[in-house]
Image: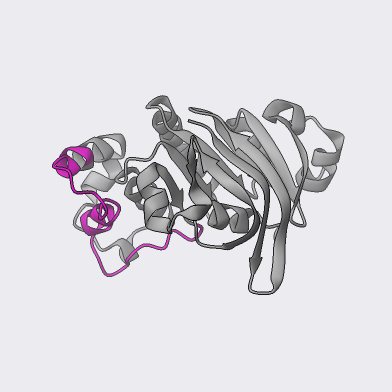
Amino acid sequence: MNLSVENLSAAYGDTRVLWDVSLEIGEREIVALIGSNGAGKSTLLGAISGLVDIVGGEVRYGDVKLNELPPDRIVQSGVVQVPQGRRLFGSLSVRENLLMGAYLRRDKEVEADLERVLAMLPRLRERIGYLAGRLSGGEQQQVAIARALMARPKMLLIDEMSLGLAPVLVDSLLDILTQIHASGVAILMVEQDVQTALEFAERAYVLETGRITLTGPAHALLDDPNVKKAYLGV
């Protein structure tokens, strides 16, 4: 199913942040959303996830109108966010954090899915009993991704995955995302690391001051002189 955002405007109280944003993420597609600090990228993910007030337009996932649903129902529909800053429960173990990702589920396959996720992220199996707050930044980001996987997403919204991490750790996380994508999960990636995002994604959108200003194949945007000047320092 496709995720479709049509003429979306969003605000925090009386402060408008997004204006008439439209974009689409296809089934099994990897799409990057790039832009400077304060452009509204995280706000857009929050609006899709039901966490930010939408004041115009709509969000659809297949035939489901997400902007009419509460956040928990959006997760149950298959659209799951990995938040900026990870937002783990630091005083809970890795296992407990992962099971929090399945808190809406009532099926009997949670333990089987936990094993599947740990097979994909073997470092977490080694850390399964550790408190999440004691893990390294890269390990915490793995927990945040794994927790989202426990909700059985069909589409992942990933907010600033590389923030504060060394390039070698980012590369290992991208390898994990490649595995996730190969399993049939679409990805919308918000990134300030524009080079990384455009090299990883298939398509991309540029968001500036709350509006989409450019879109196209990721490799084309990587070579675009305006993108190079604004975001790559070239």
Q: Residue at x 22, y 39 (%)?
A: 113
- Colour scheme of the picture: one colour
Instruction: Using the rendered image of the protein, determine whether residue 163 is visible from the camera's viewpoint.
Output: no
The x, y position of residue 40, in whole percent, is 67, 57
**Quadrant of the rendered image containing residue 172:** top left
The quarter of the picture where the C terminus appears is top right
Asked if the stretch drawn in magenta spans residue 96, the answer is: yes
Asked if the stretch drawn in magenta spans residue 55, the answer is: no
Looking at the image, residue 137 sits to the left or right of residue 149; the answer is: right
The x, y position of residue 47, in whole percent, is 56, 56
Say which of 48 and 35 sits in front. Answer: 48
Q: Residue at x 37, y 27 (%)?
A: 183
The x, y position of residue 194, in whole percent, is 68, 43
Instruction: Using the rendered image of the protein, determine whether residue 208 is visible from the camera's viewpoint.
Output: yes
Measured along the vertical axis of the image, is residue 125 above or below residue 219?
below
Q: Residue at x 70, y 71 (%)?
A: 15
**Quadrant of the rendered image containing residue 221:** top right
Measured along the vertical axis of the image, is residue 148 above or below residue 121?
below
Measured along the vertical axis of the image, is residue 19 above or below residue 226?
below
Looking at the image, residue 34 sits to the left or right of residue 119; the answer is: right
The residue range painted magenta reads 84-113
